[in-house]
Image (spheres, rainbow, N blue to C red):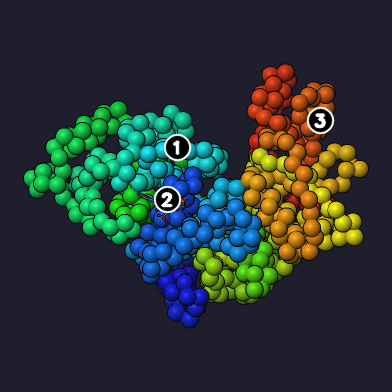
Amino acid sequence: MTSVQSSFNGSSDALENTDSGISLAEAVNRRRNFAIISHPDAGKTTLTEKLLLYGGAIQQAGAVKARGEQRKVTSDWMEIEKQRGISITSTVLQFEYQKNIINLLDTPGHQDFSEDTYRTLAAADNAVMLEDAAKGLEPQTRKLFEVCRMRKIPIFTFFNKMDRPGQDPLTLLDEIEAELGLKTWAVNWPIGSGDFFRGVIDRRNQEVFLFKRADRGRQATEICLKLDDPELGNHVEKDLLDKALEELELLDAVGSDLDLEMVHSGDLTPVFFGSAMTNFGVRPFLNTFLEMAQRPIARTSSQGLVDPIKSDFTGFVFKLQANMDPRHRDRVAFIRVCSGRFEKDMSVRHARTGKSIRLSRPQKIFGQDRAVVDDAYPGDVIGLNNPGMFAIGDTLYTGSRVEYEGIPCFSPEIFSWLRNPNPSAFKNFRKGVNELREEGAVQILYDTDQSKRDPILAAVGQLQLEVVQHRLQNEYGVETRLEPMGFQVARWVDGGWASLEKIGRVFNCKTVQDSWMRPVLLFKNDWNLNQLLEDHPEIKLSSVAPVISGVEPINL
Ligand code: G4P
């Protein structure tokens, strides 16, 4: 593996390979991979930066922060272009900490690009659910949680901003249990919050980590005392400590037990309280995460579960990104390594086409920087130059043929006709639309009436449409017009056209087809959707498109 210690300056010379000489099993064993799910402003950028500092991956606080700040001006699409590859796309941040290799699958900060996050979660073995302790569960977190639930990803919850007045911690746990149906186990427990935040009690070690307020952004000093240390009284008011201990007693009496199997099946979440900005609780969180998180897992394939320590290399494409580096106008496919050892220059098979490909310039991509890598292991992500060959969900393998489960399409919420006012530019228009669909920048739907040839762009957020339009102009030279359709909800019909025909005419919705010619119903609102379900209880609708493998999508 390649450490990214110095890759912030873009140099690959100083990269060291700390995996050399160890077995595949050892390399897998020391890897942990995760994505952070959160609502904007919960502190994802801040937490990411603090985690990277522990790994020594960035020397200076602010490197990631700068990205967060840039992100906030993305309403102007000229700015989107400038920041492409950083603020609206996901990359991978790899760092080494206490002999572990951690792959943080970074996701876009802007919620309009959450489709990208959904796909990234397909490559993650664990998720960190970051919540603002004052706000509790927020909409974007709920949505991303649902995606984790589909894949049964273990979830680690971090309640952030404890240095500010927050909600009652028991209420925060109740909310997760009641609304997400996820059991909780508090690893640490806060003593007060806001101006009265005094620290956290480590439940297993019966220790108190004291919170000492530091200047904004500076690391608070870490002082740790045993819970029965008389010295504690000099730092924590008795009433605050008593309250925290009473709450803990309650949790001991009625709460769940810590069961690692339940953590790994995504049924129980270990919970942490801290403050990313003051760097309080981040290190203990990282340590416990490393201890409890799932190692790179065996993945379901056409050949059953594939063990990561199987010697044949396998991996799948979970993301495509064009023009990450505007200077090179390149297209990169992100591959999650699932089994075996990946080596530079190795020849692999591309399961969808059966072709053999030599992977000559695999890259580690760290934020905006890249370095060519010599090898990679299960849990790692590599970037491959994509001359139009890879599609999302594609499997690469050596040895006997395997194909991993595809990545589903998630329910879009904004729909717009994409018009091409200049018929002479149709060739480029078609190329752009097809390539951007392939890349997963947007979903493409079509009217069932063949005479209406214009594609329908289906996205999760408005900004996603604007980026597509902007890229069509800049990368394909075609000017386009968006014509909003006024729908907000899409549902795929289980059983396809046959099921739809059975119920006859449907009202208050529009039937369109996706790129695999499957029927999709568009509704103006949930009310119309519910009405259809009431009128036709026999129809089964799904907010996620079922995965189909081996069938090529239709192009414009
Ligand atoms: P995001 O990536 O999830 O959108 O959140 P980000 O890290 O950008 O943080 C959002 C805001 O919350 C930032 O403030 C950040 O400083 C603040 N924040 C993050 N963690 C904590 C914490 O533990 N305690 C407190 N009090 N604040 C926290 P901002 O004013 O929007 O930006 P900035 O001026 O600090 O850069």
**Residue placed most toward the observer, 295 or 325:** 325
Going by the numbered disc 3, the residue's amino acid type is Ala
For label 1, being within 8 Å of ligand 1 is answered no
Label 3 to label 2: alpha-carbon separation: 47 Å
Give coordinates of residue 482: x percent, y percent.
76, 48
Badge 1 element: loop
Res 433 → quadrant: bottom right
For label 2, being within 8 Å of ligand 1 is answered yes
Asked if residue 34 is positioned above or below residue 188 in the image, the reply reads below
Q: Which residue is mark 2?
A: 43
Badge 2 element: loop
**Is the Cβ of the residue at disc 3 closer than 8 Å to that at disc 2?**
no
Which tag, 3 or 2, sits closer to the chain's start?
Answer: 2
Give coordinates of residue 484: x percent, y percent.
74, 41
Q: Say the numbered circle drawn on residue 339.
A: none
Label 1 to label 2: alpha-carbon separation: 14 Å
Q: Say the numbered circle drawn on residue 137.
A: 1
Residue at the (19%, 47%) spot, across then down: 207
Label 3 to label 1: alpha-carbon separation: 40 Å
